Amino acid sequence: MNQQRIGRILYGGFAALLVVCFAASRIAAQAPAGFVYVANCGSVGCPGGVGTGSVSAYMIEGMTGALTPVPGSPFATGIGPQGVIVDPFGRFVYVANLQSNSVSAYTIDPATGALTEIPGSPFAAGGTSPRTVAIDPSGQFVYVANVTSNNISAFIIDPTTGGLTPVPGSPFAAGTAPITLVVQHLQANSFMRRTAGALPAREPILAASRPTPSTPRPVP
């Protein structure tokens, strides 16, 4: 094989590699960095609102942070949604519906961010005027602050379906008109539950939902 032919082969391989790398960079740039979910209160109890309420969903553009509406958005909720949260692993969305005293639950399409209501949703809040919803960082429990009944509802999350089951003893007494809540997570307890096999061995997505990246295939 002469040097000229070797040069052509090397050049062709280099050009093909550039094309593959360029295509991969284009795909990475076009893939969403995550999703944003917004509770729209509606006209019931929210002056200027429209309808009974909904959740708007957006894709985050990875390079610029710009938002693009998810197909099918906005998605129906109960009446007067106030609080919305994504579970730590980006699987489920939960919405506190102030006026209908319920919690709507959805699964997230990891590719598009679209929401599908979970069977049994909306779930009874266990109190009146649920305003804020929170999830513990292990992704096992949902907590809801109920404003007018002055208590906190607690639920167990079904790890397969995302459905909610009240924790024994729920709701729990709170102060007057609780409007927000946060959850502290003890690392020691997290480690013990992980080693017992109760939790999936992966890092939680604490602030937002994002699609699962695909593993790139090696170039032959």
Image (spheres, rainbow, N blue to C red):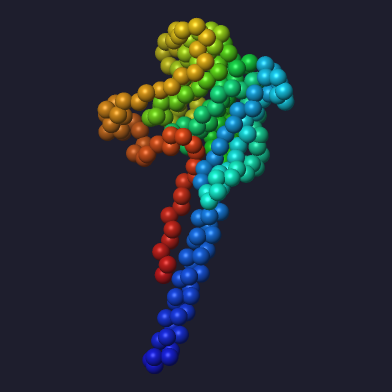
Q: Quadrant of residue 106?
A: top right
Q: Quadrant of the C terminus?
A: bottom left
Q: Is residue 75 visible?
A: yes
Residue drawn at 65 percent across, 37 percent down: 73
Q: Residue furthest front?
A: 64
Is the N terminus in the top left, top right, bottom left or bottom right quadrant?
A: bottom left
Q: Residue at x 63, y 34 (%)?
A: 56
User: Residue at coordinates 39% horizontally, 91% vertically from top-left?
Assistant: 3
Q: Position of residue 197 (x, y in %)?
A: 31, 33
| x, y percent for residue 107 | 54, 34
Q: Is residue 187 left or right of residue 180?
A: left
Q: Is residue 171 left or right of residue 100?
A: left
Q: From where the camera sits, is residue 160 visible?
A: no
Where residue 217 appears, as percent x and y from the top left, is 43, 61
Q: Position of residue 189 (x, y in %)?
A: 29, 26
View extreme (bottom): residue: 2
33 or 101, nearer to the observer: 33
Q: Residue sitting at 47 percent across and 65 percent down?
A: 21
